[in-house]
Image: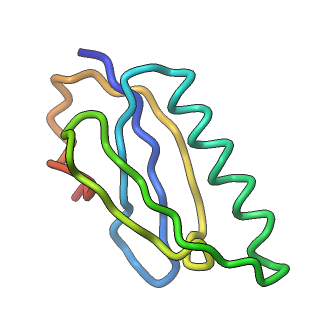
Amino acid sequence: MLMYTVEITLKNNPIALSVQRKEQENALELYREIATILLDVPSGKTKVLELTCEKQEGKRVTVLTGEISAVQVSEKSGSSANMGAGFIRA
């Protein structure tokens, strides 16, 4: 199954957090939402962002937006050997 991964890199943290979306448009929407949040961070508008994963339903992660340093979206097949379980990819 084809999934789209939105990966978030946090400041001072070598491990990126990732969530998957089944539809490309949903992944791009989340990517744009996080990118827009990053524009507000320099002005001190830090928020709490809760993310859910469509690959493993019921999994949730919450991050402080001021700690996000980068976001990217990529396409991954369900058979990809390098994907970890849940939100964290090794």
- Residue at position x 46%, y 43% in the image: 6
Toward the right, the furthest residue is 43
Residue 10, position as x, y percentages in the image: 48, 72
Taking 43 as reference, is 24 above or below it? Answer: above
Residue 41, position as x, y percentages in the image: 74, 74
Taking 30 as reference, is 71 above or below it? Answer: below
Residue 39, position as x, y percentages in the image: 80, 63
Query: Of 16 and 19, which appears nearest the observer?
Result: 19
- Residue at position x 59%, y 61% in the image: 70
Image side of residue 9 versus residue 55, left or right? right
Task: Using the rendered view, name the quadrant where residue 4 is placed.
Answer: top left
Image side of residue 33 versus residue 50, left or right? right
Toward the top, the furthest residue is 1
Query: Of 6 and 15, which appears nearest the observer?
Result: 6
Image side of residue 50 versus residue 42, left or right? left
- Residue at position x 34%, y 25% in the image: 3
Q: The N terminus appears in which quarter of the rendering?
A: top left
- Residue at position x 42%, y 26% in the image: 75
